[in-house]
Image (cartoon, grey):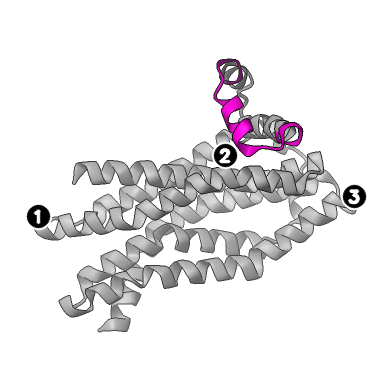
């Protein structure tokens, strides 16, 4: 059981660091004007996150099964996993300036070489790793001072917090709900995780992503200042951090709601 929890911590941490970095790709797209290349390169990171996502659900299932067999309440472990998601998001925010330095150079290398594999292999070379360490930088007040936060729709931030909260606890709530229903409904209840995450993704794609993309595209065309995109990214990251904390409050109510549907 301990090894399962450790693997869950690692996969959750990776997922939320990479998901946080995803917001900052908008900055590189606008600054460099290379939207397509930026997305192509970031897909490499997304594959790592996707792999961690794939592993997360069965690991949570193993945790619940072990808890059932040993007569242990899995709730404390689930709450700890959510805190790991918060820590991963926070570290992602802290490392964003460093990631952007690395990502900007990687996009330039991709433009020259035309091969993602070549960029990846070059990044693993000793001189590249040394350069990465030398260019480590952290957020500062100067980076966010005087940003036009008032020009970013507040409902966008509220919705992103809610989406992140649901997305963080979707699988965990579904599996925990399986403990609250009769044995014959447990498989059906645990399968509800996909429905919850799909609902969160639909909200994101319908209400959050379009408005974010409009702001980014307007900046790419020169119709909005670059600072607007910086303000957008800072607020989306902050909303994600708040959303993971909200997951602590949403975990049990969501599980009870799922369980009530099957009772």
Distance (Cα) linking label 1 and label 3? 60 Å
Few, some or many residues within 10 Å of mark 3 (<14, 14–19, 20+): few
The question of residue 85 being in magenta is answered with: no
Q: Position of residue 145 (x, y in %)?
A: 74, 37
- Secondary element under disc 3, as helix, strand or loop, is loop
The question of residue 127 being in magenta is answered with: yes
Q: Are marks 1 and 3 in contact (CB under 8 Å)?
A: no
Is 92 displayed left or right of 196 in the figure?
right
- Secondary element under disc 2, as helix, strand or loop, is helix
Distance (Cα) linking label 3 and label 2? 26 Å
Q: Identify the residue position indicated by label 2 in the image.
A: 93
Q: Position of residue 198 (x, y in %)?
A: 49, 69
Distance (Cα) linking label 2 and label 1? 38 Å
Few, some or many residues within 10 Å of mark 1 (<14, 14–19, 20+): few
The quarter of the picture where residue 94 lies is top right
Q: Position of residue 3 (x, y in %)?
A: 23, 41
Is 231 displayed left or right of 163 in the figure?
right
Q: Position of residue 231 (x, y in %)?
A: 72, 47
Is 146 displayed left or right of 162 in the figure?
right
Q: Are marks 3 and 2 in contact (CB under 8 Å)?
A: no
Q: Is residue 213 above or below residue 13?
A: below
The quarter of the picture where residue 9 lies is top left
Q: Is residue 244 above or below residue 155?
A: above
Q: Identify the residue position indicated by label 3 in the image.
A: 222
- Secondary element under disc 1, as helix, strand or loop, is helix
Q: Identify the residue position indicated by label 1 in the image.
A: 70
The residue drawn where x is 75% and y is 45% is: 29
Residue 139 seen: no
- The magenta span reads 110-128
């Amino acid at each position: 059981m301990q090894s399962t929890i450790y693997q869950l911590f690692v996969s959750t941490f990776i997922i939320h660091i990479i998901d946080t970095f995803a917001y900052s790709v908008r900055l590189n797209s606008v600054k460099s004007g290379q939207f397509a290349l930026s997305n192509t390169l970031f897909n490499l990171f997304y594959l790592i996150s996707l792999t961690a996502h794939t592993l997360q659900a069965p690991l949570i299932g193993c945790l619940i099964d072990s808890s059932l067999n040993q007569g242990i309440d899995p709730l404390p472990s689930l709450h700890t996993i959510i805190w790991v998601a918060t820590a991963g998001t926070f570290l992602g925010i802290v490392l964003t300036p460093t990631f952007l330095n690395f990502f900007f150079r990687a996009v330039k290398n991709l433009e020259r070489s035309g091969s993602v594999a070549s960029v990846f292999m070059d990044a693993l070379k000793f001189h590249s790793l040394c350069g990465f360490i030398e260019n480590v930088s952290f957020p500062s007040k100067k980076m966010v001072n005087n940003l036009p936060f008032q020009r970013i729709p507040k409902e966008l931030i509220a919705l992103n917090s809610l989406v992140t909260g649901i997305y963080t606890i979707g699988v965990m709530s579904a599996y925990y709900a399986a403990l609250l229903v009769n044995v014959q409904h447990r498989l059906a209840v645990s399968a509800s995780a996909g429905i919850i995450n799909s609902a969160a993704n639909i909200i994101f794609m319908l209400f959050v992503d379009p408005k974010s993309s409009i702001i980014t595209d307007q900046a790419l065309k020169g119709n909005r200042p670059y600072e607007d995109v910086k303000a957008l990214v800072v607020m989306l990251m902050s909303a994600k951090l708040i959303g993971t904390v909200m997951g602590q409050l949403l975990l049990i109510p969501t599980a009870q709601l799922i369980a009530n549907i099957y009772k």
